[in-house]
Amino acid sequence: MRDDAEFPTEDRSPTTREETGDRDPASGQTRPPRREFKARGSFVERCEGCRLPVLNCLCPYRVSATSEARVWLLTHPLEHNKPTNTGRLIADVLPQSETFTWYRTAPDERLLALLADRRFVPFVIFPDDQPDYQHRVVDERAVVSAKQDGFIPVFILIDGTWRQARRIFRKSPYLEALPVLPLHTDRLTRYRLRKPASASHLCTAEVAAELLRNTGDTDAANVLDDYFDAFNESYAASRIYHKLEKPTAPMKRLLDRRLSGSAHARLLGEE
């Protein structure tokens, strides 16, 4: 697999204390001060809905989809305020997705409760490159089997830099008993907002789309792919202050889906 876990992440800029909180949630102690966040683009006027520069707002292309599998994001706290983060695109497309902030000493109680819910069969998405957890590694047939048995499979995506993802995987006891599902794909990244170490290193949204596609949720995968491409093109154009005058092919498909969804809703309202 390759999320901003198995793969270098979208952005490695520092953040402010206001973005991560002044105190550690477990100890209550004040965190050491960080330098003010002044990354490139921090003064750009952004849409409050999609957080992209208003020059190429993504909101007109936001549509939702349904899937049998669900996605839970376990996100490093420094990721939340990075506008180039693609994990949030998953939640835009799949409303049943969950996002949890990772703290080593203070696991999210809601996540722990969901992990104990017998309706779900969670899989940690992580590469199978270390021998000490090979006994936990499964393939995508396990996801299909969970569906056939009437359970809801869940993809737990670790959202952070590769170093952060390794730490989250190793320092989270509640993940230790879960099966590990690596993503094996021939897909090459289309992410344009950072330069990966390898073209095979996919970003978070791309990983989710591939997992969904490989396990039977093709429609959701296609919508997420189109939404990711729209985000990719919009953000890349905004970086050079270029206004996209015409929607791209993925944008057109999203607009068509949005229009068809609105028409269907009107028909239901008339019945």
Image: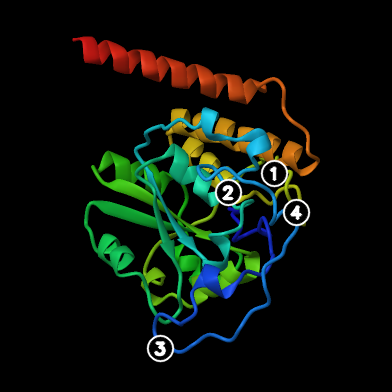
Q: CA distance from mark 2 to mark 4?
A: 14 Å
Which comes sooner in the sequence, label 3 or label 2?
3
In what element is the residue under mark 3? loop
- Badge 2 density bin: few <14, some 14–19, many ≥20, Cα 10 Å: many
In what element is the residue under mark 2? loop
Judge whether 116 appears above or below 53 on screen.
below
Residue at 75%, 57% in the rendered image = 40
Q: Are marks 4 and 1 in contact (CB under 8 Å)?
A: yes
Residue under pointer 3:
27
Left or right placement of residue 265 versus residue 164 in this view: left
Label annotation for residue 191: 1
Judge whether 124 appears above or below 141 on screen.
below
Q: Is residue 126 visible?
A: no
What kind of residue is marked 3? Answer: Ser
- Badge 4 density bin: few <14, some 14–19, many ≥20, Cα 10 Å: some
Judge whether 238 appears above or below 33 on screen.
above
In what element is the residue under mark 4? loop
Label annotation for residue 234: none
Residue at 60%, 53% in the rendered image = 85
Q: CA distance from mark 4 to mark 1?
A: 9 Å
What kind of residue is marked 2? Answer: Thr
Colouring of the image: rainbow
Q: Is residue 63 visible?
A: yes
Which comes sooner in the sequence, label 3 or label 1?
3
Judge whether 122 appears above or below 147 on screen.
below
Q: Are marks 1 and 2 in contact (CB under 8 Å)?
A: yes
